[in-house]
């Protein structure tokens, strides 16, 4: 169990709020909220991914076009600030994935905007598919033999499927996307979730997209109440802990206005994570004989 949950956040992964989706600026709000709530988290600085790392999951010309502002990003613009944030969002998820593999439990990447990004094109507020960049980077390193992606955003992770197909990775990347082929009725969805997570037990790592847009009041989603969304997260984290599957999770979608409503949903996800992975009796501040600050036990 943890003394502090590792969260991979750097202000460089945040871009301004002048577009329709809150994704580029949400990480800063969410992390500030987690800190204000006194959650036992530890902020770690991620490293940005390189163009070569992005090219593990994307066509090189597409990457260069977006980052050199010659092609629209997933928000349909050529914002220099959005482009500058993109290596940091994928980098945050890759760093969280590596940390979860190392600590064998959990790490957090407060990021969004990945799963509609296809091999050679952006779409739906997503530019680069950090889920697949991380997955392929870990497979190439030999850090994992098989990796799972459990995408509980409301929408179909079409970009993830596209990259899995283009790179013939179906034997190495197990992808479940709630927006495609899973019941959009709360009771049925929650009832089958434990079995779904258990199905990832032979994966070396699970990447979990804890999207906030399945909320009933979300303008782009709508079938789970606030309590049911938190139950979703509790089921996932209880199951990953039970089966010993290291999990790296991120934020994904959420479009309620004002954005505070989305921030509160992500706070519930962190609360569920803490319930599964944090043991207050191991808090280093309460144990002078304990591990050095920031160490995991
Ligand atoms: Zn979505």
Image (cartoon, helix red, strand yellow):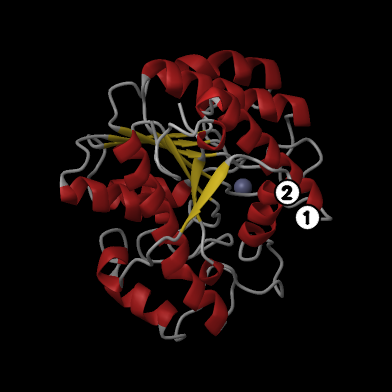
Q: Is residue 33 above or below residue 269?
A: below
Q: Does the rendering let one see residue 165? A: yes
Residue 63's image quarter?
Answer: bottom left
Q: Quadrant of the C terminus?
A: top left
**Which is more toward the observer, 10 or 206?**
10
The residue drawn where x is 30% and y is 39% is 102
Q: Is residue 196 above or below residue 90?
A: above
The residue drawn where x is 27% and y is 64% is 53
Q: Tag on residue 259? A: 1
Q: Does the rendering let one see residue 183? A: no
Q: How crowded is the residue under tag 2: few (<14 C-alpha within 10 Å), some, or many (20+)? A: many
Q: Is residue 223 above or below residue 126?
A: above
Q: Are marks 2 and 1 in contact (CB under 8 Å)?
A: yes
The residue drawn where x is 52% and y is 67% is 13
Q: How crowded is the residue under tag 1: few (<14 C-alpha within 10 Å), some, or many (20+)? A: some
Query: Left of 40 or right of it: where is 67?
Result: left
Residue 258's image quarter?
Answer: bottom right
For the residues labelled 2 and 1, the Cα–Cα distance comes to 6 Å
Q: Tag on residue 240? A: none
Helix, strand or loop under label 2: helix
**Which is more toward the observer, 25 or 118?**
25
Q: Is residue 79 above or below residue 29?
A: below
Helix, strand or loop under label 1: loop
The spot of residue 55 in percent (x, y) is: 27, 66
Residue corresponding to mark 2: 263
């Amino acid at each position: 169990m943890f003394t502090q949950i590792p969260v991979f956040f750097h202000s460089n992964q945040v871009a301004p709020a002048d577009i329709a989706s809150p994704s580029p600026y949400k990480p800063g709000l969410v992390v500030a909220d987690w800190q204000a709530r006194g959650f036992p988290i530890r902020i770690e600085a991620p490293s940005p991914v390189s163009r070569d790392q992005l090219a593990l999951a994307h066509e090189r010309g597409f990457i260069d076009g977006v980052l050199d502002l010659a092609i629209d990003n997933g928000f349909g613009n050529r914002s220099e600030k959005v482009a500058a944030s993109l290596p940091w969002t994928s980098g945050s998820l890759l760093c969280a994935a590596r940390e979860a593999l190392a600590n064998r439990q959990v790490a957090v990447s407060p990021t969004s905007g990945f799963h509609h990004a296809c091999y050679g094109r952006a779409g739906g507020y997503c530019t680069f598919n950090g889920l697949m960049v991380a997955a392929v980077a870990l497979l190439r390193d030999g850090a994992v033999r098989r990796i799972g992606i459990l995408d509980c955003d409301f929408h179909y992770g079409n970009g993830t499927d596209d990259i899995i197909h283009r790179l013939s990775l179906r034997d190495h990347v197990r992808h479940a996307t709630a927006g495609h082929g899973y019941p959009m009725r709360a009771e049925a969805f929650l009832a089958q979730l434990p079995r779904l997570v258990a199905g990832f037990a032979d994966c070396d790592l699970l990447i979990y997209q804890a999207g906030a847009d399945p909320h009933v009041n979300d303008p782009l989603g709508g079938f789970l109440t606030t309590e049911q969304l938190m139950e979703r997260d509790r089921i996932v984290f209880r199951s990953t802990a039970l089966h010993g599957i290291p999990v790296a999770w991120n934020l994904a979608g959420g479009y309620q206005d004002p954005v505070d409503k989305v921030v509160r949903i992500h706070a519930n996800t962190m609360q569920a994570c803490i319930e599964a992975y944090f043991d207050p009796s191991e808090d280093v501040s309460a144990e002078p004989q304990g591990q050095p600050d920031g160490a995991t036990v």
